[in-house]
Image (cartoon, rainbow, N blue to C red):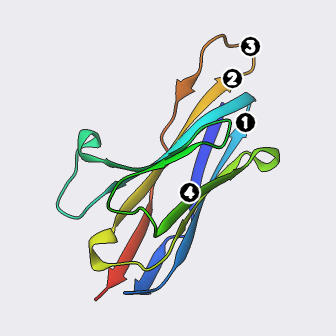
Amino acid sequence: QVQVVESGGGLVQSGGSLRLSCTVSGRIERVNGTAWYRLPPGKEGEWERELVARIMSDTTATYADSVKGRFTISRDNAKNTAYLQMSSLEAEDTAVYYCRPQILLKGARVFTNYWGQGTQVTVSP
């Protein structure tokens, strides 16, 4: 019913930039907030994913301290897409990045959180 697809990951040198995208499609009534999480190397569990940034429907954004001033989260409601612009990347930013949109399906009464499949970001020193 719902597809959540991240893209934009890759290999970049320290100090470089990447922009991740998270597109939602399917039988969707509305997307509320969207969050970006990351899973660093050596960790595997869903519970080990770290919250990186979150944007609400009113575009209010919050960030983890480790990325403040370097990452910017945004959204395009018309495209059901959220973005994570990452600048001044560091080796410590290497991780699999996941988006987590809060979605109201058509005919549903409550929002549900969904995970994308993840996109790898590797920052070389």
Mark 3 and mark 2: Cα distance apart in space: 6 Å
Image side of residue 125 versus residue 81, left or right: left
Q: From the viewer's perspective, is residue 74 above or below residue 27?
A: below
Specify the amino acid type for callout 2.
Leu
Q: Position of residue 15 (x, y in %)?
A: 41, 86
Mark 2 and mark 1 in contact (Cβ < 8 Å)? yes
Label located before the other in sequence (4 or 3): 4
- Earlier residue among tags 4 and 2: 4
Q: Mark on residue 107?
A: 3
Q: Secondary structure at mark 1?
A: strand
Specify the amino acid type for callout 3: Gly
On residue 105, the disc is: 2
**Quarter containing the C terminus:** bottom left
Nearer to the camera, 58 or 75: 58
| Element marked by disc 3 | loop
Quarter where residue 122 is shown: bottom left
Please indicate whether residue 91 sits to the left or right of residue 29 in the image.
left
Report how far apart the C-alphas of labels 3 and 1 lie in the structure.
13 Å
Q: Are marks 1 and 4 in contact (CB under 8 Å)?
A: no
